[in-house]
Image (spheres, rainbow, N blue to C red):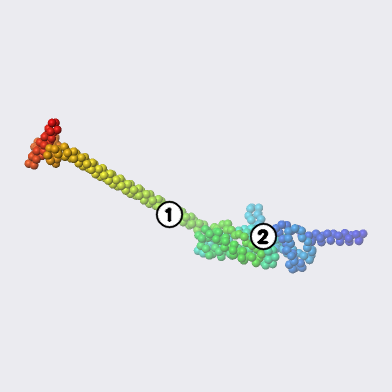
Amino acid sequence: MGLTIILVLVAVFVILFALMGFKIVQQSETMVIERLGKYNRTLDAGINIIWPIIDKPREIMWRYVKESLDGRPIILKIGTSRIDLRENVYDFPKQNVITKDNVVTEINAILYFQVIDPVKAIYEISNLPDAIEKLTQTTLRNVIGEMELDTTLTSRDTINSKLRAVLDEASHKWGVKVNRVELQDINPPIHIREAMEKQMQAERSKRASILEAEGSKASQILISEGMKTAEINKAEGDKQALILRAEGEAKSIIWKAQGEADAFQSITQAVASMNTDPVNYLLAIRYIDTLKEMVSGKDNKVIYMPFEASNVLGSIGGIKELLNGGKS
C-alpha cells in the first residue's frame, strides 16, 4: 500500500514536472529563457520544452492601457514573461513644452514602436516603457524648443520626422524600432489662440482688400484699354474713310478730265475744217454756262461783261457757222 502511494506521487511529480517544461508561445510573441540566472535562448512560436526549476522565463515590464468606469484611460505597467513582437502604440499623456519664442504649449504625442531584439529589450534597459516615455518627452521638448509657435503649428511633418529619427537612434540599443511618431494635439494658451484668430481675421481682411483693389485696378485697365482700342478703331476708320474719299475724288477728277479730253478731241476734229480755234470754242461754251448761272438768281440785276469777252463772242459766231455748215 505504501509503495503504491509512493509510485502515485512519483507519477504525479513526473507529470507536473513535464507540464512545467512545456511552454506554448503564441504567434508574434517570444520568451527569453535563463538557465540558472544566465541567458540561455529565445523561444519561437509554437511548443517549446525547457527544464523546470533550472530554466526560467525572464520577465519584462510592459505597458497596458485600460479604461475606467467613467471612460478615462488607466495606464498599467505590469511584469510579463511574454514579449509582444507586434507594433505597439504608446499614447502619452499631454505635456507642456516651451517654444523658441517662449510660448508654453500643450502637446499630446503618440508613438508607434516594435521590439526587434527581445534580448536587448530585457538586458539593455531596466524599464522599457518608462525609458521610451521619458525619451519621447525630452526629445519632444528639445525639438519644439528650437521652433517658434507659428512654425510648430504648420510643421507637424517636420516635427514627426525629427522625433522619429532621434528616438529611433537612441532606442536602437534597446532592441526597439521606432516606426512613427505623431502629434495628436498642439494647444497654445487661450489668449494666444484668441490673438491668432484676430491675426487670421485681419490677414483675411487684408487679402480681401488687396483682391478687391486688384480687381478694381484690372477693371479700370480693361476699361481704359477698351476706350483706347475704340478710339484707335475710330481713328483708323476715319483714316480709311478719308483715304477712300480722296481716292474717289481723285478717280472722279481723272474720269472728268478724261471725258473733257475726249470731248476736246472730238471738238477739235469737228472744227478743224472751219479754221476755228478749239480753245476759243471751249471758252465760249464755258462762258455761256457761266452766264446762265449769273442770270438764274433772283437778286442778279447787273451783268458786267469784261472787255476780253469780245473774243469769246467771236467764238460764239464760229459755233453758229459750224452749226450752219453742218446743216448744209
Return the x and y of residue 200 as percentages of the image width and height.
47, 55
Give the alpha-carbon distance from disc 1 to disc 2, as whole Å: 51 Å
Q: Is residue 277 visible?
A: yes
Return the x and y of residue 134 as percentages of the image width and height.
62, 64
Disc 1 is placed on an element classified as helix
As drawn, 47 above or below 301: below
Q: Is residue 96 left or right of residue 116?
A: left
- In what quadrant of the picture does the N terminus appear? bottom right
Q: Is residue 115 left or right of residue 99?
A: right
User: Label 1, on which residue?
Assistant: 206
Residue 28 disc label: none
Q: Depth check: 251 or 138 in front?
A: 251
Q: Residue at x 53, y 62 (%)?
A: 104
User: Label 2, on which residue?
Assistant: 63
Could you say which quadrant of the image residue 28 lies in?
Answer: bottom right
Q: Is residue 260 visible?
A: no
Q: Depth check: 92 or 245 in front?
A: 245
Q: Total of numbered circles in the picture?
A: 2
Disc 2 is placed on an element classified as strand
Q: Depth check: 18 or 46 in front?
A: 46
Q: Are marks 1 and 2 in contact (CB under 8 Å)?
A: no
Q: Report the amino acid beneath label 2.
A: Arg
Q: Report the amino acid beneath label 1.
A: Lys
Labels 1 and 2: the sequence-earlier one: 2
- In what quadrant of the picture does the C terminus appear? top left
Q: Is residue 35 left or right of residue 103?
A: right
